Image (cartoon, rainbow, N blue to C red):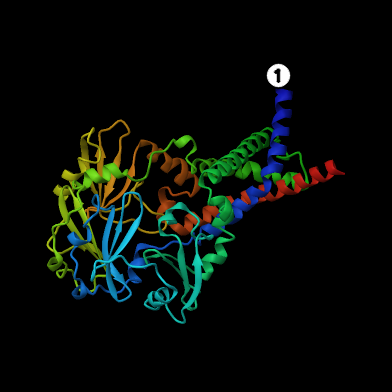
Amino acid sequence: MRWSKPMKRWLHLGHRWLGIAAGLFFAVWFVSGLVMLFVGFPALTEAERRAALPPLALDAVRLGPQEALAGLPGFPAAFTLSMRDDEPVYRLTGPDGRRLVLSAVTGAPLPPLSAEAALALARRHPAARNVEDRGVVERDQWTVTARYDASRPFRVVALGDPAGTELYFSEGTGELALDTTRAERVWNWLGAVPHWIYLTPLRAEAALWREVVLWLSGMALAAAVSGFGLGLLRLRRKRLTPYRGWRAWHHLAGVAGGLAVVTFVFSGWLSMNPNHWFGPRMPDAAALARYAGQAAPAFPPGRETLALAPPGSVELRFAWIGGHPLVLAAGPDGVRPCCGTEVTQDRILAAASGLLPEAPLATALRLDAPDAYWSDRHGAPRLPVLRLVFADPAATWFHVDPGTGEILGRIDRSRRANRWLFDALHTLDVGPLLRHPPARQAVIGLLSALGLIVSVSGVVLGWRRLRRRLA
């Protein structure tokens, strides 16, 4: 009892000043989070990328895959054949991320993409109307993350369509890296940009941005926890709250929505993977090389086998699985093995032993429907999928596409915990809400409205306090 009064006072003071410091951020996070429910950050989906590729002119190919690999120290991390305007080209990505584009006609490296060449590529896009060159961009708001580093700089071309689409082509390789629409660009200034604190100069410094978000969200979490605790302590039996006006709104909304505010901020803080508690989402390069079972720059299927690709193919992908060569044909209707190569479950399981050579493969489970750990709130996940369960200390699972052999993700015990600590708490991707997006959006909207009342009332009270202090 002797310590009760001083502790309450310090709790009150801590919440007051932490709330003043973080109040505006709370308000921005709740408003921007609602926008993000309906408009995601610009990204090029695999279906959009394939739709923008013209059909392969296989009769023009004069260089086989083996010749394209000549002189390389090892098999590339990615190796494909597609078109660059009217010319078939091989695109190769090294283990370090560097990319090389070779003509499949002459074998010569292709020069950087010119403005005229970018316009020609854009005119082939299904949505193209009156294309217009927007110049060269090294880094902008929509290409700020490190995932685009290997493709920089970009040539940006506007399609002149009603959606205001802009395409980002890598100047070095000619590949389409990103598309954005006018609606995405406008709404994301109210959504993902403020929510993730995606200011270009800050986000370009990944380590600094991560520290800023961790400390800011940590401070906000302390404000939310202390406020929720104070709100419970100040409840009254008859009138519920001893306050009036803005204070009453802040108190009652904080009690009603305080737990949601705490879990939203806590899970958002966890999304930054503090102290690297959560394991990687994909296997590392060494594990992928062991899965391939072939590190040398070799690919036996010759040029004549490429002619067996299905009509309408827009891209051929060359890979190894368990020491066996594989050609995948990508078209408008998906990706599947071709050209005399195949993928079987036995071959996948044999190759998978290389993913974690120190641990045995315990179980291989085929999923034909989503479950708690294989789901996608943005749409249906790729199905069917093989779940490979290993008996290692981290209880690691790998998800593999049984039709193509592609490894789709890695999830260990820490990542499965993160699935509940972030996805379930932050985006409510759990139970019936995951299966009914409108219901999930409605619940998030209701909780966000309570959080917004808490935030706005806190900003008003904080401003009044500061004004009196400054006066």
Left or right? Give the position of 289 relative to 30: left
Q: Position of residue 462 (x, y in %)?
A: 75, 44
Seen at 52% across and 43% down, the residue is 207
Q: Secondary structure at mark 1?
A: loop
Which sits in the foreground, 331 or 141?
141
Disc 1 crowd, CA 10 A, few/some/many (<14, 14-19, 20+): few
Q: Is residue 358 above or below residue 43?
A: above
Q: Position of residue 44 (x, y in %)?
A: 41, 63
- Evaluate whether residue 333 shows in this view: no
Q: Which residue is mark 1?
A: 1
Does residue 222 appear to the left or right of 50 in the view shown? right
Q: Nearer the viewer, residue 367 or 462?
A: 462
Task: Please give the name of the residue rendered at 18% of the width and 59% of the height, measured from the top-left corner.
Answer: 66
Spot occupied by residue 40 in the image (x, y as percentages of width and height): 49, 60
Q: Quadrant of the C terminus?
A: top right
The disc labelled 1 sits on which kind of residue? Met
Residue at horizontal 23%, vertical 52%? 75
- Depicted 358 relative to depicted 73: above or below: above
Q: Going 55% across and 61% down the picture, which residue do you hit?
A: 188
Vertical relation: 439 (above or below) 137: above
Q: Is residue 31 left or right of residue 45?
A: right
Look at the image and tell me whether residue 464 can be seen.
yes
